[in-house]
Amino acid sequence: MSDIQQEKERIRRRMKRVVGAKSHDERAEAGRKIAESLRETSQWQQARTVFAFLSLPDEPDTGYIIASARADGKRIAAPVTNPERGTMTFYPLRLGEELGTGAYGIHEPSTTEGPLAPSPWTLILVPGRAFDLAGRRVGRGGGYYDRYLGRLRTGCTLVGCCYQAQLVEEVPTTKHDRPVDLVVTEAGAGRCRRDSG
């Protein structure tokens, strides 16, 4: 394991403890504030489609963002993973749809409609164990988002979504890591610096 991988593992373990201490109410309140802050950004206002992740119990509740997207008339999609191939594809998320449970216990939309491809007017919410102010992230280690984002050829907006406590001074990265454009927490939204690495 390389030094970068070891440091990422240390960050993952530390953040697992940090977010594990959050109560259900704290998670819900963070999700509400994140949705409010994101909705005020120009990136949100310009987006026509939102690719949202369906949050796990230790992540801010993205249900508020999904509700905001519906209220604002945006199309919504959520990821479906293929563990055998190590890939992830976004499918439409319909109101009232009964969700399935995919890999790692994550809820997933139906795949009866075809997948959605991102466009320059797509805003992609990106989960992470930690982010820094340059938009670099540490994921959970599965690499699904890294591979998906690495294949993007459109100018869509990438938004890191996490608790304020998950912001760190610096995230170690490799050449394959793609930074996000904006990070939003319960304390507000901020455009990422590109001058810090």
Image (spheres, rainbow, N blue to C red):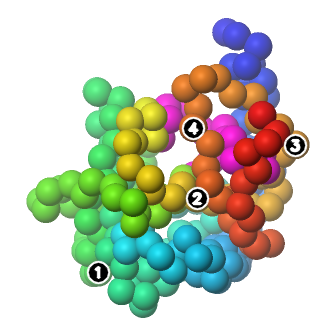
**Bounds of the magenta span?**
127-146
**Residue lying at 87% horizontally and 43% vertically, measured from the top left:** 169
Tag of residue 178: 4
> x, y percentage for residue 83?
33, 32
**Taking 166 as reference, is 137 left or right?**
left
Q: Nearer the viewer, mark 3 or mark 4?
A: 4
Q: Nearer the viewer, residue 145 or 81?
A: 145
Residue at the bottom extreme of this rendering: 71
User: Splitting the image into 4 quarters, where does residue 188 fall?
Assistant: bottom right
Query: Would you say residue 123 sits in the magenta stretch?
Result: no
Q: Residues within 10 Å of mark 2 (few under 14, many from 20)?
A: many
Residue 135, compared with residue 85, is above or below; it is below
Gap between marks 2 and 1 measured at Cα: 23 Å
Q: Main secondary structure of the magenta part?
A: loop
User: Splitting the image into 4 quarters, where does residue 21 fall?
Assistant: bottom right
Amino acid type, callout 2: Val
Amino acid type, callout 1: Leu
Q: Nearer the viewer, mark 4 or mark 1?
A: 4
Tag of residue 169: 3
User: Please, what secondary structure does the residue beneath circle 1 have?
Assistant: loop
Q: Residues within 10 Å of mark 3 (few under 14, many from 20)?
A: few
Residue at the right extreme of this rendering: 169
**Taking 129 as reference, is 81 left or right?**
left
The residue carrying mark 2 is 159
Is disc 3 in contact with disc 4, using a CB cutoff of under 8 Å?
no
